[in-house]
Amino acid sequence: MSRAFTSKSDISELMKECRIISDANRIQRHLQTALLEEEVVEVQMQDRSRTFFTRFVDNLPPLEEFTEEDGSVVLQEPEYQESSYLLERKLVLIAPMEPINGNALIRRSQQVFFRFPIGTNSLECESRFLGIQSVRGNPFISLAFPSSCKELSQRRYYRSKLLTKDSSRVIVHLPDKEIAACTLLDIGINGLAFENPWPLARLPLGTPVSLLLEVPNFPDYRLDGVVLSHINCRKKKDCHAVSCRCGVQFSVADLNVAQQLEKAVAAIQRNHLRILRERADEAGIELMLPL
């Protein structure tokens, strides 16, 4: 997701490689899928070149109070289908952005653009700031539901996410021989992203790293790669915490390793899609998944 957002200077060029989507049902399904997939979302305000990063969040109803037989009061989850607030097509909620100055800038912006990956392309949506909305005591940013979007041809590789806690992880070796076991966030045949435990100064862009990929039911893979990106974003399950995503591009010279890696990635993707479909079936959501 490195492409700049729409500007007057490149509209004609952009139109050659994008498709306009105005079907509200299709837009809604893309947003619901991205919410369930916990995608990282890029945000940019009108007349500003800086890109900010966030995630979609659900508009959960308040917890309900329930009185036990002994008179004690407990809180319980009310009936609510995941991401169903998007069915109303009125607003889209995002977590506070990183860097944090974006949360002040967006209040003064008449136009807001946000973009997220859909398979090997990206969907760019035009919106506007509605206000700050509290969900269970947490402040989130409310944006207008987009009336149209642009599907951009990004020519990017699809990366499968890891939606649940499992034993997949990546052991990262820095050039100075320091080692850390890191949380694996997503993976594809050309690269992966992990949660970076180091200060950015220790892992600048272009840094060569050695990786040991540990995936259940597959042999461990030793790979080389190069750091291509850093993104600070709110954590998936804790909007108050910020983590740094580090993107690495693989340098795989051994054909056998490449073939085994493809099998491991395919297995992770199958598990990811299975979990996603189960959650979607429970919530009655028709997903927009890559073929």
Image: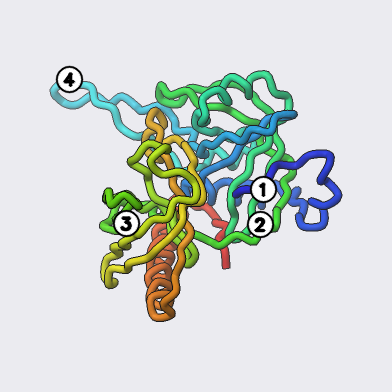
Q: Mark 1 and mark 2: span between their CA atoms? A: 8 Å
Q: Nearer the viewer, residue 6 or 36?
A: 6
- Farthest residue to the right: give it: 12
Q: Residue 71, labelled with which disc?
A: 4
Q: Mark 4 and mark 2: span between their CA atoms? A: 58 Å
Q: In this view of the protein, can residue 281 be seen by the observer? A: no
**Residue occupied by mark 1:** 3
Amino acid type at mark 1: Arg
Q: Report the residue at 39% width, 50% height from top.
A: 194
Secondary element under disc 1, as helix, strand or loop, is loop
Protein image colouring:
rainbow
Q: Residue 165, labelled with which disc?
A: none
Which callout, 3 or 4, points to the residue nearer the camera? 3
Q: Mark 3 and mark 4: span between their CA atoms? A: 49 Å
Q: Nearer the viewer, residue 84 or 272?
A: 272
Circles 3 and 4: CB atoms closer than 8 Å = no
Q: Residues within 10 Å of mark 3 (few under 14, many from 20)?
A: many
Secondary element under disc 4, as helix, strand or loop, is loop
Q: Earlier in the sequence, mark 1 or mark 2?
A: 1
**Residue occupied by mark 3:** 170
Q: Report the residue at 58% width, 19% height from top.
A: 104
In which quarter of the view is residue 17 placed? bottom right
**Residue occupied by mark 2:** 154
Question: Number of callouts in the render?
Answer: 4
Give the left or right position of residue 252, taking residue 17 as reference: left
Secondary element under disc 2, as helix, strand or loop, is loop
Q: Position of residue 74 (x, y in %)?
A: 24, 26
Q: Earlier in the sequence, mark 2 or mark 3?
A: 2
